[in-house]
Image (spheres, rainbow, N blue to C red):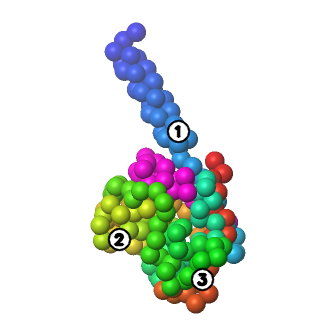
Amino acid sequence: MNKFQKLFIFIFIFSLFLKGGISMADENKDIIHMTLKDGIVVIETKPDVAPKHVKQIKQLIEEGQYDGVVFHRVIDGFMAQTGDVEFGNSNKDDFNLSRAGTGGSNLPDIEAEFSSENHGRGVVSMARAQNPNSANSQFFICFDDCSFLDGQYTVWAQVTKGMEYVDNITRGEPPADPDKIIKMEIVK
């Protein structure tokens, strides 16, 4: 076997290894279904970009914490924010729209996992207070390009289907009659 054949075989095997690595990374991504009034939004997580955020969001989903939570801040051309499982859950007896957006969950805040991921249309990113390590349960979905947020907020997922349902969310800060997450579940 000459050097050229050995090199070809090495490159071929190496490319199979790389392809396998990419496939394995994709297998770690979860698929989330977020049911809204108009239909199901399909969201793919990015555990390779924000593993701690994905882990906490998944835990809250598995506990049913997001079911009934309102979109309390929805700005046309910018984003729709939700995820206040403490004060934003319209299914709870003590729900108060004026407090929605001021709470989190009973889990600890998450250390920032900022990246070079672009905040483009359909990106799902964590909301936070001024402290970069204050993200907890609230998140937002970008309606349009929000690249001015790149490197300042943690991107943890991407809407892959159903963005038209996100586009239909009622606008307002807060909306008088806010839309809510009917159900959020991990399907894969």
| Residue found at x 64% / y 66% | 67
Q: Residue at x 53, y 47 (%)?
A: 29
**Which of the two residues, 157 or 98, is positioned nearer the viewer here?**
98
Q: Residues within 10 Å of mark 1 (few under 14, many from 20)?
A: few
As for residue 103 lying within the magenta part, the answer is no
Q: Which residue occupies the extreme bottom position in the image?
A: 176
Residue 178's mark? 3
Residue 41, quarter of the rendered image:
bottom right
- Callouts 1 and 2 close, C-beta under 8 Å: no
Which of the labelled discs sits on residue 129, or is there none? Answer: 2
| Segment tinted magenta in the rendering | 40-60
Who comes first in sequence, dot 3 or dot 1? 1
Amino acid at circle 2 = Ala
Give the residue type at disc 1. Answer: Ser
Whether tag 3 and tag 1 are in contact, CB under 8 A, the answer is: no
Residue shown at 50%/33% (left/top)?
Answer: 20
Residue 111: horizontal and vertical position, in percent?
A: 34, 55
Q: Is residue 110 left or right of residue 90?
A: left
Among the two numbered marks 1 and 2 on one chain, the one whose residue lies closer to the N terminus: 1
Tell me which amino acid carries mark 3. Answer: Pro
Could you tell me which residue is drawn at 50 percent across and 85 percent down?
98
Of the 4 image quadrants, the one containing the N terminus is top left
Among the 4 quarters of the image, the one containing residue 11: top left
Q: Position of residue 120 (x, y in %)?
A: 44, 68
Q: Which residue is mark 1?
A: 23
